[in-house]
Image (cartoon, coloured by chain):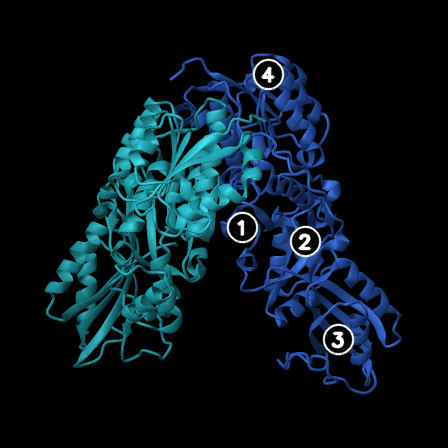
Chain colours: A blue, B cyan
Amino acid sequence: MRTRPLKVALLGCGVVGSEVTRIITTQADDLAARIGAPIELAGIAVRRPNKVRDGVPAELLTTDATALVKRGDIDVVVEVIGGIEPVRTLITTAFEHGASVVSANKALLAADGASLHAKALEHNVDLYYEAAVAGAIPLIRPLRESLAGDRVNRVLGIVNGTTNFILDKMDSTGAGYSEALDEATALGYAEADPTADVEGFDAAAKAAILAGIAFHTRVTIDDVHREGLTEVTAADIASARRMGCTVKMLAICERSRDGRSVTARVHPAMIPLSHPLASVREAYNAVFVEAEAAGRLMFYGPGAGGAPTASAVLGDLVAACRNKLATTTGAGESAYTRLPVSPMGDVVTRYHINLDVADKPGVLAQVATVFAEHDVSIGTVRQQGRNQGSGDDAAVEQSGAGERDGGEASLVVVTHRATDAALSATVASLRELDTVRGVASIMRVEGE
Amino acid sequence: MRTRPLKVALLGCGVVGSEVTRIITTQADDLAARIGAPIELAGIAVRRPNKVRDGVPAELLTTDATALVKRGDIDVVVEVIGGIEPVRTLITTAFEHGASVVSANKALLAADGASLHAKALEHNVDLYYEAAVAGAIPLIRPLRESLAGDRVNRVLGIVNGTTNFILDKMDSTGAGYSEALDEATALGYAEADPTADVEGFDAAAKAAILAGIAFHTRVTIDDVHREGLTEVTAADIASARRMGCTVKMLAICERSRDGRSVTARVHPAMIPLSHPLASVREAYNAVFVEAEAAGRLMFYGPGAGGAPTASAVLGDLVAACRNKLATTTGAGESAYTRLPVSPMGDVVTRYHINLDVADKPGVLAQVATVFAEHDVSIGTVRQQGRNQGSGDDAAVEQSGAGERDGGEASLVVVTHRATDAALSATVASLRELDTVRGVASIMRVEGE
């Protein structure tokens, strides 16, 4: 084994950074054996050097991150600060000074992964970021390497623990969104400002990264259709239950049927209880990958947290160090397909639509006609409200059953597969019907 | 991109080999883009060159595997023949002639992985074998690379599809072992001679490979404690159900609590229905990995079949080709811990023991005394048979409840954690009791 250590600089020393430091320090012998040389923590850039950090050597702390990455003797820079700037500049500077970079920064990678990869290639160093998606779950390496000889058609996953915790609470306790969010906040699963999670920004960044890798193309967060879960109600969850489903916040990346384009989206959706993703509880993450030869694979585990994220960072660090020792680099960006990202209107899926309608004869015929006019095929129709709780969920397909005179009723339509554009047009027309008092909810049905 | 192709030799052209050939041929452009150079199938060694193989170029077929691996211009040899010899010699010869090897051969790797790795290292080439364990499920690469900075403490998995299919059928239909095996055979999930699967040899080979990689040590199939599932009865499955469990054939690799030794074993065991492995149906595989920082990860997917196995082979082939292009090699064997493999007697787990006892007062006291004498702590005791089906599963801990006069009764004891040695000694003593007419079954309880 080489005795001169590889030098590692750490940018950021919060929850993840402290854990990275702890592992580098306490598992030094194991890491050295696995890398083939010892690693030495050469410096840790922080904003507040005087904050007490257990197990973090104070003499390594510096507030000058730029000077640290410019030292010139750093082999690998580990970035766990997050955000776009100054991190992008720091990473670029690190590359220019010959360091490989391990990052957990989903926002930056989803915004600007291509140019960072280009910079890394230019300077013949590595850029790894397993920790940016789904914490400790090995996902980027399996997609990039294990499935390198296969054709991935679909990635479907729960990649945000906060929203999964909220939906799981709503599902298991009947709580509303606000109540479930409060519990998530109290337990530390949601941040004081939960916007990035509940509005789907966090999941969208991960979807962009996954889509790019899975389809060997470039997808940025701006290409990802995003809907938050703040409008999901207890009634939606109950409605999902009634059709043997649960509601999950999903990131879905798909190759089109003709293989010439891809889509990426993040939104709440119903999935059947029999689907493996339906049983992903609390803040866990899980990602389904469908590939032509491999079939359906699932990767499951803790999607966030200091230690799990540090595990992913350390795996990348070992790889980057091994490559440094061997004076080589790992597989870089693979974006040769340059497949365009189609708009949301092109996405094909099923829909669960809950309409408030006048409770009188002929309504179903009117509604069904609107669906037919837009070429959206109806799978099942169910009158809800009056019959609610009777357990009578029989489909009343294309018939007048379930209609009554006077008052209001709730009509639940589940469609066959249709494009999002056709569904949107259908809903716009439905809103114009006198007998449709309102569209209570529209939710996609996935995983079938 | 380099235009001179990398040359690939294929050894074996059965179900997996045909699929590998198909993908190399039909996905040539994608593979070339991902590798950075085209690959060329230079020759395919088969036993029966005249057999009709759709999509396999007849001019590439040869019966002389040795000449093929000795050609000297082969970059990567893909071995999908299986078995120990002549494959070991062919692989070694390939190394000597400068070729990297991708193998799906669990038997060979589990018997002799260390010497093959040493040979590969000596000749500065790669040895990859993702396909040897759990088909398409990325497992070896995640363990070896993604978790390279973490400490794996446990690997617990369903790694044999045939036995999972049989147990799933028994659980879902109430069928006995023979009936379920017949169905597995009829559907092609079991081979005409199912010994390797049902006696656990296949799973034991995979356990050896996983344990070695997970704990950075060397474990061969001879180190793996192995019990088949042929003695699992419909009554065992029903008994498992009654305590909220199901029976799965598990491969379990563990680091001891003091970290100084490891164990590896394959046997049927009860696991709680709430455990993610309990819901792995039919011939699917799934592996749980517990690591210190990462926490609990699960990898799920098809564990066998031509296309899934080919996917894993192709992933390795792309990696081996990239390394050839970069004139480097990937991470080789990591066995620096040299942790000894402890005997089965040292394994600590819980046990479900079903005793046929005389149905008279004092029996439970006698039985409980025997457990106490061997320091095996009883969790619950349940009288079964007379009360069967009453749903009365209340524990009658350390009391005489449930005892009746005359006839026979069935006593079900579930222990707390104890060593296998202590449990074996307990059972030996129980057999000596006059009131114990027989030990109907002993099954380990895992996943808690």
Which is closer to the viewer, label 2 or label 1?
1
Q: Amino acid at mark 3?
A: Leu
Cβ–Cβ under 8 Å for marks 1 and 4: no
Answer whether residue B147 is visible to the viewer in this image: no
Q: Which residue is mark 4?
A: A98
In the picture, measured across the screen, residue B74 lies left or right of residue A275, that is: left
Q: Nearer the viewer, residue B192 or A159?
A: B192
Q: Residues within 10 Å of mark 2 (few under 14, many from 20)?
A: some
Earlier sequence position, callout 2 versus callout 4: 4
Q: Secondary structure at mark 4?
A: loop
Which is closer to the viewer, label 3 or label 1?
1
Point out residue A304 in the picture as x, y percentages from the top left corner: 57, 42
Earlier sequence position, callout 4 versus callout 3: 4
On the same chain, marks 2 and 1? The answer is: yes
Earlier sequence position, callout 3 versus callout 1: 1
Q: CA distance from mark 2 to mark 1?
A: 42 Å
Tell me the tag on residue A257.
none
Earlier sequence position, callout 1 versus callout 4: 4
Point out residue A359 in the picture as x, y percentages from the top left corner: 81, 82
Q: Nearer the viewer, residue A205 or B9?
A: B9
Q: CA distance from mark 2 to mark 4?
A: 46 Å
Q: Which residue is mark 3?
A: A411
Which is closer to the viewer, label 1 or label 4?
1
Q: Amino acid at mark 2?
A: Asp
Chain ID of residue with mark 1: A
Cβ–Cβ under 8 Å for marks 3 and 1: no
Q: Quadrant of the C terminus of chain B?
A: bottom left
Q: Which residue is mark 1?
A: A292
Q: Amino acid at mark 4?
A: Gly
